[in-house]
Amino acid sequence: MAKKIRIKDIAQMAGISPGTVDRVLHNRGNVSPSARQAIDAVLKEVNYQPNIHLSSISLRRSYKLVVTVPEFEAGEYWASFHKGVKRAMSVFEHINIDCKFMYYNQFDLYSCRSVFKEISEMAVDGVIIGPTFRDETVFLTNILEEKNIPYIYVDSQIEYTFPMACFAANLYQCGYLMGKLIDMITPADSHFVLFQTERVGDASANTTILRKQGLMTYLQEANLHTNLHRLSFSVGDPERNEALIGNYFEEHPEVRGALVLNSRASVIANYFERHHINGVKLIGIDLTDSNIRALKAGRIDFLMGQRPEQQGYLGVKTLIQALIYGTKDQGGYIMPLDIIMRENVDLYQEFSDIAFVEGK
Amino acid sequence: MAKKIRIKDIAQMAGISPGTVDRVLHNRGNVSPSARQAIDAVLKEVNYQPNIHLSSISLRRSYKLVVTVPEFEAGEYWASFHKGVKRAMSVFEHINIDCKFMYYNQFDLYSCRSVFKEISEMAVDGVIIGPTFRDETVFLTNILEEKNIPYIYVDSQIEYTFPMACFAANLYQCGYLMGKLIDMITPADSHFVLFQTERVGDASANTTILRKQGLMTYLQEANLHTNLHRLSFSVGDPERNEALIGNYFEEHPEVRGALVLNSRASVIANYFERHHINGVKLIGIDLTDSNIRALKAGRIDFLMGQRPEQQGYLGVKTLIQALIYGTKDQGGYIMPLDIIMRENVDLYQEFSDIAFVEGK
DNA sequence: CTGTTAGCGCTTTCAT
DNA sequence: ATGAAAGCGCTAACAG
């Protein structure tokens, strides 16, 4: 068992003082080429792994982060994410993290634009972005890249930008999995309906499109793609929806499964309940409070979980680590897709508090 | 935001030196009643939460742990558990943990007895037990309790003993969930077969019984309990099994689903493959290498995951914390039941490496 | 540019 | 029985 290597050891091996080693490790400059070389040589030999908890007590500077995600209410998806961010800050309590939350309205492109504009003008060390609008995000990330400010995506990512990490579910795979599930729990050759909740100025289409692609791929592979119906739902016009759904399932008895590719499955579940539509399986996404209620009531059969809390936790942790140690390529990590049903939802929820296995 | 409280703060408030506060916190004795009282009073006021990572660097003593679980080979359930234990030791690298693994043969009561006997005579600070045999375990835990040595169960627990914590899945709920799943993915009123792998001297019956109870409860609620067949499989006699299974499914076309309530589902999956039995859904437990292979090959439909790696990690962490801070009642935590299928198994596995969110 | 040093919160030794 | 002080690994200010 190789003994744990410390800065002092590296210093000794390189014939340099620990202070200089630290300067190298943190790219803090003021190091002669010769010293740098000697230390780099040693670092190549040994596998030095700093302990962030020890770093954290001696760290004197502070880090200014911005977290920008859609506005949310208690019990919603982004509330869990927020919890994870707070958790990270408490676990790394000794690091002076000045974390500013800046929310935008995910249904209002202009709100996002102005918030991102503001962020782009701020002096910050790192940014965590839960993106919705492509162009606005590209605008922001371009400036961040120019200014050499690392940023991390959570929940989903924007193509052709260069985050230092990304914590999100694989949307395509999510759709594919949902297709497989609905197929499994309905009789052979059933028909399905895909609820599309249309919202004015909804650019989150982005994430939905990928899920839809995954879903379609599954259905094609299973030779069921012609069995998929679409039903458009406008969040703003409930009366129209009531009328719409009233007869739909009577007219389409062949439809045995329903899918909602965003976190609003509970809305559909409630329609089902009011209109006494039984025997139609329903699968949705995200463990929001209202989705969980519908799941427990037996109105939703499966929910896909994407661990938003861990996304928040890992986002902060990764960013902080990068800032402290100057790591550049943290890679993009993909969250698992948790399959949640009435019978395991409580265990899942209770455990998520413990799962943050930090030593506190 | 209340400022974080430190030992120094407590000392000041109590008008005592930090050294004495530490002695109280760790029950290290040599403290006058008056000092103790003053400090206790302050502790009642403030919510002091020591940071284990800071404790760990200054800790000079070492802790001797014993981990006793069934023997295993690479890729099996207990191998994942082992990984979690190692992970904990690496995360808490600065704590001098002397961890001795003592394996017993889970199919041999005498092996367990002699190993537990040996443990009972050792001088250790804490024990982690993955129990199989009830009486042998009670023998050991009785002695540990006499000697005031804390112990923790992982994987399952033994009734009427008093571990300081337990990290295990809810077996009853696991069986219930499996019943629900097999019902969901088979046509209405299907028949099911429960594979019972009988093993000589198999006392792990214990865990299987609870799962079976959960399963039966579901089937009764769904009014399907008369649809359940049982098929006994002896691990030691493969020829007999071959003969047995050969005709079974031909004779019982009404059987559309199969359940295995231990980690050997892949054995059944392989029989299915050799005998070209298709159209029978199969659900098993644990992400062993061979189960995962069968899952990916489409021979197993669902696997229940119990996070053995986290069980190992949390077991060590909880025990260490208890030893350092003298906490007594860590409670019994229940692992979630993860539902794994071909479409999310890779994400799940890949992530488990990252999920250990400790700051390293 | 670099070595020395103080200090983070916590534990433990060592005088008292 | 208790306070003072040293030290764990790491960082950053400071003096040169």
Image: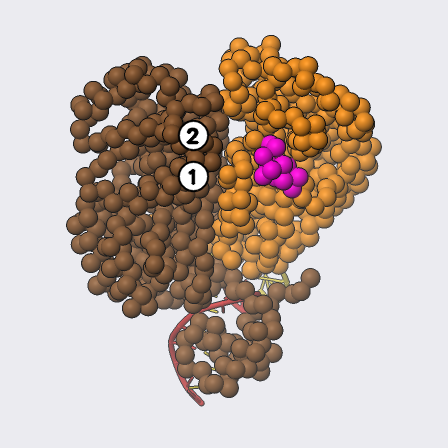
Chain colours: A orange, B brown, C red, D yellow
Q: Where is residue B180 in the image (x, y as percent from the top left)?
A: 47, 32
Label 2 element class: loop
* Membership of A293 in magenta stretch: yes
In this rendered view, identify the residue nearer to me: B229 or A151: B229
Residue B328 % position (x, y): 43, 65
On the image, the x and y values in percent for residue B300 come to 39, 25
Determine the main secondary structure of the stretch shown in magenta.
helix
- Residue at image location 44% in from the left, 71% down from the top: B26
Query: In the figure, B331 relative to B282: above or below?
Result: below
Q: Looking at numbered disc 1 in the image, what kind of residue is underneath it? A: Thr
Q: Is residue A350 visible?
A: yes
Nearer to us in this view, C9 or A231: A231
How far apart, in angstroms, are the residues tagged by discs 2 and 1? 10 Å
Q: Residue at x 35, y 16 (%)?
A: B253
**Residue A117 horizontal side relative to residue A31, left or right:** right
Q: What element carries label 1?
A: helix
Residue visible at 25% across and 45% down in the picture: B203
The subunit letter for the residue under badge 2 reads B
Near-viewer residue (B201 or A306): B201
The amino acid on which the numbered mark 2 sits, given as a three-letter code, is Leu
Point 29% across, 56% down: residue:
B66
**Magenta span covers which residues?**
A288-300
Per the image, the residue denoted by label 2 is B224
**Which residue is under mark 1?**
B217
Give the side of residue B51 with respect to residue A192, left or right: left
On residue A149, the disc is: none
Crowd around label 1: few <14 · some 14–19 · many ≥20 (10 Å): some
Task: Using the rendered view, name the quadrant where residue A313 is placed.
Answer: top right
- Name which of mark 2 and mark 1 comes first in the sequence: 1
